[in-house]
Amino acid sequence: MSGSFTEQRNELSHLASESCHLRQAFKDDAQRAQRYTTRACGITLDYAKNLINDASWRALQQLAANSNISKLREQMLQGAAINNTEQRAVWHTRLRQQDVTGLMLDGEDIGQQITECRARMAALIDTLHQQQYLGYQGSPITDLIWVGIGGSLLGPQMAVEALTPYHCSPVKLHFAGNIDGAVVSDILNGLHPATTLVVVASKSFGTEETKQNALAIRQWFTEHGADKAAIAHHFWATSSNIAAAAEFGIEQKNILPMWDWVGGRYSLWSAIGLPIALMIGNQQFKQLLAGAEAMDQHFFSAPFSENMPVIMALLGVWYINGHGCQAHALLPYSHYLRLLPSYVQQLDMESNGKSVNRQGHALPYATAPVIWGDAGTNGQHAYHQLLHQSALAVPADFILPLKVKHPLKDQHSRLAAHCFAQTQALMQGKTLAEATAECVAQGMTEQQAAALAPHKVSPGNKPSNTLLLPELSPYYLGALIALYEHKVFCQGAIWQLNSFDQWGVELGKQLSGPIYQALTGNGSNNFDSSTAALIKQFLAAQNS
Ligand code: F6P
């Protein structure tokens, strides 16, 4: 496979059109699982239940070799401005590097900045854990509200949830995202400002949702008699826009840094990870970083044929550009990982949901899939029906921690049984002959069996990956997140786009300004007829 990705894509489509029957492939090759399984940082990826054979897998490997992955990976490591539309380096991997001594970027001692930030975060957390952070009325802080959205919220929220068994904080944590006033109103119910710390997490410190939520909380402080000094004592920020944070009333000593070289959706390794460190403690937070660093080392050094992020990226490209799939399901068989799909949604779709290449030229092929999913087994009683029997092909990642901390071990075996059974059912399906025999065995007449059996047929041949984690610990969670980050990176490299900007989200933000003016009676309702009618109806409801 050679030439531009456009040419290679044609070859992928051609290869994909050649039939591959997974049920038969497993019968023909007892070593299939062994051949298509790889391991990294303790994580196992079984990708044998994918629509690949020797020829297509060789072609995909060749695609990786011909792609930009190696070059871009090296440029990322060197701190080149691979986020070319914003002229920024992409260095989130440096944030999990244990030893950052002497790390320089554009003449700045980044290593020292990272070290200082880590120390300030750890000190704040220790003080909170020891209940020595006293509020403006002298009582210890009991609650922390984390105000942010997108990359400044999804990562910590997902990881905090995922690591529930490791929670050790005496301080309760509340996440306030979304401009819907219900979120902050609900959080403030039952809290008191004198025992509440607020962290405004916004890289830009200009995001409307975060600003409005922060203003509402500041107002609540004022209404409870907190003066300027009290508010300054209770508000922290994590931001790269020190001036805007200071203008809001946050003191410099309470501002933890963010850097231009860390994209929002890649930032949970920075001070954006503070809620994680708060909930699991500083030592376990280090383990999260260590797991991610181990996956970085694997990604940077393993040959492509064994490189887990590369393999997952190739399979994704295979389905999107070879088979025409448009979606990818993420199905964690772990209650604690139930927010992983929403986290990866931003990671993947905001990174690679693009239609121009790095030079701004239109891409003649599809890129990122629609990522969706939820925790198993709940999905089995909802959308798995479509996975099994609809004509749509939705490749899926099944994720299972092997060991759990809760005492209901038999239920864990049952959960695992369902996880494995789903991948097996998707792969092998059920033929008409099998469905008919099943009906007859249940006592139906031949006629009854013939009528019902077609409804029971599952075509099978539906692809899936299975990822096994030894356990859902901070270390393996760090490795898992880094795995998905690097998968997205490789796909962006193959599709020749910039995975690190997100210009598409701007238009909606721009248009909401004049609409807000119209909704509040300060602007004209001079929009297209649909938008104008919606505004009119909203205004009528407010005035009724
Ligand atoms: O709207 C998109 C976005 O810019 C994300 O990329 C980012 O993670 C999020 O908004 C929040 O941005 P900030 O941290 O600057 O408030």
Image (tube, rainbow, N blue to C red):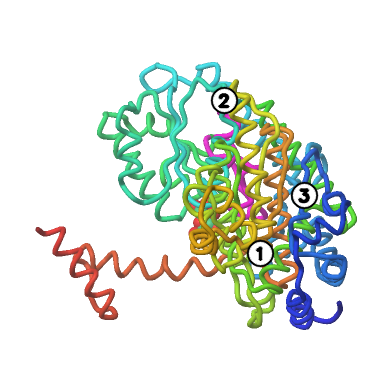
Judging from the image, what secondary structure is the residue with disc 1 in? Answer: loop
Q: Nearer the viewer, mark 2 or mark 3?
A: 3
Viewer can see residue 247:
yes
Relative horizontal placement of residue 26, taking residue 525 as reference (left or right): right
Is mark 2 in CB contact (under 8 Å) with mark 3? no
Q: Earlier in the sequence, mark 2 or mark 3?
A: 3
Tally the marks: 3
Q: Amino acid at mark 3?
A: Asp
Is mark 1 in CB contact (under 8 Å) with mark 3? no
User: Residue at the location (72% across, 57% down)?
Assistant: 487
Q: Amino acid at mark 1?
A: Ser
Residue 470 forms part of the magenta stretch: no
User: Residue at the location (55% across, 20% down)?
Assistant: 129
Judging from the image, what secondary structure is the residue with disc 2 in? Answer: loop
Residue 78's label in the rendered image is: none
Residue 312: horizontal and vertical position, in percent? 74, 57
User: Residue at the location (53% across, 49% down)?
Assistant: 443
Within 10 Å of the Cα at label 2, are there few (<14), some (14-19), or many (20+) other Cα atoms?
A: some
Task: Name the residue that disc number 1 marks.
Answer: 499
Is mark 2 in CB contact (under 8 Å) with mark 1? no
Residue interval drawn in magenta:
254-279
Q: CA separation, marks 2 and 1?
A: 33 Å
Residue farthest to the left? 544
Q: CA separation, marks 1 and 3?
A: 27 Å
Task: Name the residue that disc number 2 marks.
Answer: 167
Residue 241: horizontal and vertical position, in percent? 53, 51
Task: Name the residue that disc number 3 marks.
Answer: 46
Q: Quadrant of residue 144?
A: top left
Q: Quadrant of residue 338?
A: top right
Judging from the image, what secondary structure is the residue with disc 3 in? Answer: strand
